[in-house]
Image: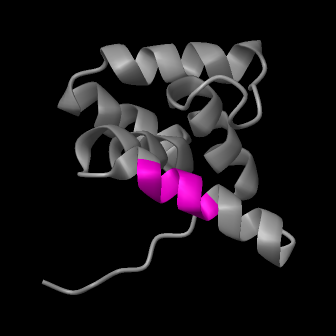
Amino acid sequence: MSAERVVFSDEVVGHLLARFGERGEGTPPGVFVERLLDLLAAADDENLDRLRGMFPEYVDAFLAITRTPHGLDFFRALARDARVGGGS
């Protein structure tokens, strides 16, 4: 298995933290992205693959935060690093 580095934009990290983090974390998304995140939460694997075709970064970020151990902590670290390093 090859190790692949995944990079998420500050915007996507902020939106996912606003959705899953504690109050005040992240950047609240607009209505469209809120609805997209609702779809991702309801989608089975087949429909996640379909959504990935249009919104790959959001799908991968959503899965990283919801299906990996310590996913939320990982996103908090990304946000912290972006604040310290000036963001992407």
Give the image quarter of residue 45. top left
Q: Look at 66% across and 24% down and name the residue there.
A: 33
Q: Position of residue 79 (x, y in %)?
A: 67, 57
Q: Position of residue 9 (x, y in %)?
A: 68, 58
Q: Look at 37% across and 50% down and name the residue there.
A: 71
Determine whether 34 is above or below 75 in the image. Answer: above
Q: Is residue 42 visible?
A: yes
Q: Position of residue 30 (x, y in %)?
A: 78, 20
Determine whether 27 is above or below 41 in the image. Answer: below
Q: Is residue 60 visible?
A: no
Give whichever of 60, 56 is nearer the camera.
Answer: 60
Q: Is residue 47 left or right of residue 51?
A: left
Does 76 lie within the magenta span?
yes
**The residue positioned farthest toward the bottom in the image shown:** 2
Q: Which residues are magenta?
A: 73-78
Q: Is residue 13 left or right of residue 37?
A: right
